[in-house]
Amino acid sequence: MTHDFPASTVLGFPRIGPDRELKHALEDYWAGRIDRAALEETGRSLRAGTWRRLHELGLREPGALPSNTFSLYDHVLDAAVMAGAVPQRYRDAPDPYFAMARGADGVAPLRMTKWFDTNYHYIVPEIGPRTALRAVPDKPLAELHEARELGYATRPVLLGPVTLLRLAQAAPGAPAGFTPLDRLDDLLHVYGELLSALAGHAAWVQLDEPVLVTDGGSPAVRHAYRRLAGLERRPKLLVASYFGDAGDALPALAVAPVDGVAVDLTHGVPRHLELFEGRTVVGGVVSGRNVWRTDPDAARALLAAAGATAVGTSCSLLHVPYTLRGEQDLSPALPSELASLPSELASRLAFAEEKVAEVVALAGLGPKPGPLPVPPRAAGPVRTESRGAYEARAAAQRDLGLPALPVTTIGSFPQTGELRAARSAAAAGRLAPAEYEARIEAEIARVIGEQERLGLDVLVHGEPERNDMVQYFAEHLDGFAVTRNGWVQSYGSRCTRPPILYGDVSRPAPITVRWAAHARSLTRRPVKGMLTGPVTIVAWSFVRADRPLRDVTLQVADAIREEVADLEAAGIRIIQVDEPALRELLPLRREERAEYLAWAVAAYRRATSGAADATQIHTHLCYSDAGEVLEAIDALDADVTSIEAARSGFAVGAFGRGIGPGVYDIHSPRIPDREEIAARLRAALRTIPPERLWVNPDCGLKTRTYDEVRAALTNVVEATRTVRESVS
């Protein structure tokens, strides 16, 4: 049997730019410094650079290079636009695409949440019974032709129809019981037109269906691909699943005459893969989720067992940094912002470009990576630790003197250009440590003063010393390494630099105490200590491949427990330990969730259970479908939990402790008015007693400007005062 599919490929590639060119162009466009044409030109340049680099790395056969994987904001949003699913309220905006992503005057953005079990955020499409679905093939066709003009024959990548509908939510006003999947036949007609438009221009089209690795969906998959594969005019179809074992769904897909499948082999060989004998099988043996080198011997064994006819990545390389080049060539004495990776660690790593080289090299012989030094210690048994009863804690905390509906923020305040410049100068040695610390103290004083003038009840120090809520802790914990330029897209223009967790974790010294104590000295109002929780630190790091997540998380929990104790000793009575990634690590299969939630909750309680009853423990979760893990959130046993709600419309029911459903979507530049905020508070008061209801934004304010923050928080405080008067 011969196959015309290329011998090696990748399912996607990073798109933010090697030097975050897209981030800077987006922010310039949103600020009015460039026009849409200039933004589009940046996109064209980045696409051309990606195809050129992938070709240089060895992906040279026709169809080996993917196209339509680039996005100005989000690929799920792109798929919704491609299917005509643009809600009417956005159509008259100056730029409907970014209005859906970020909001516009008088119109809130679409909901945003996590892409399966990753830290990438996607925009949730809205589809109702009357949504006028239609084929809009402009973007995939344009990128296909762009590549062809540069001499590359690419393989367009489309989000599959079943996944698109499963990720969408019912449009406002949809009748009870309606789900977007009810529109499957209508959407299949649209996809038929899209595939017909691509026929003759591309030999293969990749349809991404990561929903195959979740529970359910097999009947929809069987129906969808019988119909699409039966089209008279279409390219060959490669259906790609990733993020887990698609074995249970493969029989439903195999009955359709699709031409090939791409499967994630990093979890082993899926069941039922033999049903695709004689068809193209792309074996995803190079992980797109971690930064560790692939063992070529193990990879070849998996490829042979799977009967793979081509080698690929397990998923898109969107989730890893661009390249290791430049990460290991400077003095090890550099400050953390410019630190190079230790050579013994760097030799074990592969970022996106290095992973492409691995895919290409798997057809030949490659060197086998050696083991990392010092095997990690085991964590021992998991114990779910407890504090005193909530009622006793609440009584002990009354001397904090908080009003009903206390107003606070999640933690961070705007990171100004001056602040970022000072941090870079200090890291490069151009600014003396004492001068840098003085600037941080001055910024903390500014943040405290702003909050007092605005009338907030519980203050924060604003986190001016932190580059990122996980990287900052990684820089101060043993067992972690940080990169110089290892940026990964989180959403839109937002990028993070995930640390690399390679050894045993411990805390050599206090991390946050100095800054929290300084903030406390500047005000008589309560100040929160701000910590990142153990699950989130692990979830947003690249953990060495031989380390069980449970063991690593419990080690981090012990370090955070020490930090909690030191904050208490410094007189900090309110300590927030954030866990926005609690839902993110939830296994995609229901049968595996109970075990994960048990150790995740145990890790959080291990980090916080040493606090005295009089210390108020807060936690925070955002943009993560919190409703799916409400029992686990309750089991964290925090005194106060803040949850993103303004963007998602998440309605919190009865809750046994303090709860702060967000009233202000900080990921949009739109300023909510006072009546809008008051209406949200009144709605929350229907199920939450005023003594347990907190008022806060959805998330930290780091990405907003001070002008936006002042305007929004002024409305939050005034709306709260109005509602507070009505309930007192």
Image (cartoon, helix red, strand yellow):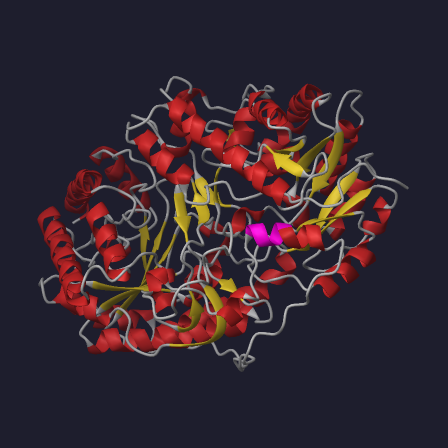
Q: Is residue 408 shown to the viewer in this render? A: no
Q: Quadrant of residue 303?
A: bottom right
Residue at left offset 31%, top offset 42%: 666
Q: Is residue 88 magenta?
A: no
Considering depth in this image, is 65 or 464 the residue closer to the camera? 65
On screen, residue 158 versus residue 688, left or right, reads: right
Q: Quadrant of residue 241?
A: top right
Residue 20, above or below 594: above
Q: Main secondary structure of the magenta part?
A: helix
Residue 619, above or below 224: below
Considering depth in this image, is 556 or 301 the residue closer to the camera? 301
Residue 531, above or below 486: below
Extreme residue in the right direction: 1
On screen, residue 238 versus residue 294, left or right, reads: right
Residue at left offset 76%, top offset 53%: 363
Residue 152: x percent and y percent?
A: 65, 31
**Total count of labels:** 0
Residue 104: x percent and y percent?
A: 33, 27
Residue at left offset 17%, top offset 60%: 440
- Quadrant (top left/top right/bottom left/bottom right) for the N terminus: top right
Q: Quadrant of residue 88?
A: top left
Residue 136, above or below 349: above
On screen, residue 513 versus residue 301, left or right, reads: left
Residue 201: x percent and y percent?
A: 70, 22
Q: Is residue 675 shown to the viewer in this render? A: yes
Q: Which residues are magenta?
A: 352-356
